[in-house]
Image (cartoon, rainbow, N blue to C red):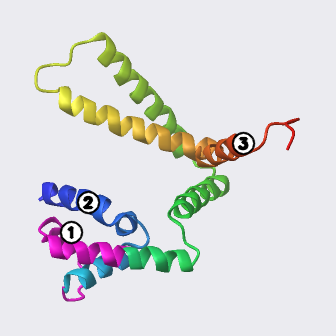
Amino acid sequence: MDDIFANALGVLGRVAPTIAGMIGGPFAGMAVQAIETAFGLPATGDKDAALKAVANATPEQLQALKAEDNRHAEAMEELGVRRDQLGVEDRKSSRDMQVQTRSWVPGTLAIAMTFGFFGLLGWLVSHEPPQGSRDILNIMLGALGTGWAGMLSFYFGSSKGEHEATQLLARAPAIGASN
């Protein structure tokens, strides 16, 4: 069953990235509704049934899903909701919560994630993984690496702004250059 959901999420990511971004967050209900609309399913709000339908979709249904995704992307843009803003707002609310509660949990998780990521990475560099466990260790390393990058983004901000600033500077005329 997990394979079906993993397959469905992969299909959503390729065919309907806006809906895929919504399915795991606060807009999950809207994402399920979009899938039900695209596939002509009864409006039950059942996320598992919607994902199962995506995993077993026909090419025609995938085209309808893509069209529904485009409608949702336009609607979200009209409402001023951009995909990158959702992540920024999510991190901001987490940071605000941390300032208010002064919980020790995020710091402890960050330290554990750092030691886990670099510990596993160091172990993999210096040892041969046991027979049959290479794939699971690589999956674990990828998950720890992704979590570690998210932790850095939480504490130090996203690099998206840095990337945009670099692009703007690259297009700017050189200082002292004649026009």
Residue 6 % position (x, y): 21, 55
The picture quadrant where one finds residue 132 is top left
- Which quarter of the rendered picture does the C terminus lie within? top right
**Along the polypeptide, which appears first: circle 2 or circle 3?**
2
Within-10-Å neighbours for mark 2: few <14, some 14–19, many 20+: many
Name the residue carrying label 3.
169
Residue interval drawn in magenta = 41-69
Residue, x 85% and y 36% (percent of image)? Answer: 177
Q: Is residue 137 magenta?
A: no
User: Is 15 displayed left or right of 54 in the figure?
Assistant: right
Q: Which mark is residue 51?
A: 1
Residue, x 21% and y 13% (percent of image)? Answer: 128
Amino acid at circle 2 = Leu
**Along the polypeptide, which appears first: circle 1 or circle 3?**
1
Name the residue carrying label 2.
9
Residue, x 26% and y 31% (percent of image)? Answer: 138
Residue 64 % position (x, y): 25, 78
- Viewer-proximal residue among 167 and 13: 167
Within-10-Å neighbours for mark 1: few <14, some 14–19, many 20+: many
**Along the polypeptide, which appears first: circle 2 or circle 1?**
2
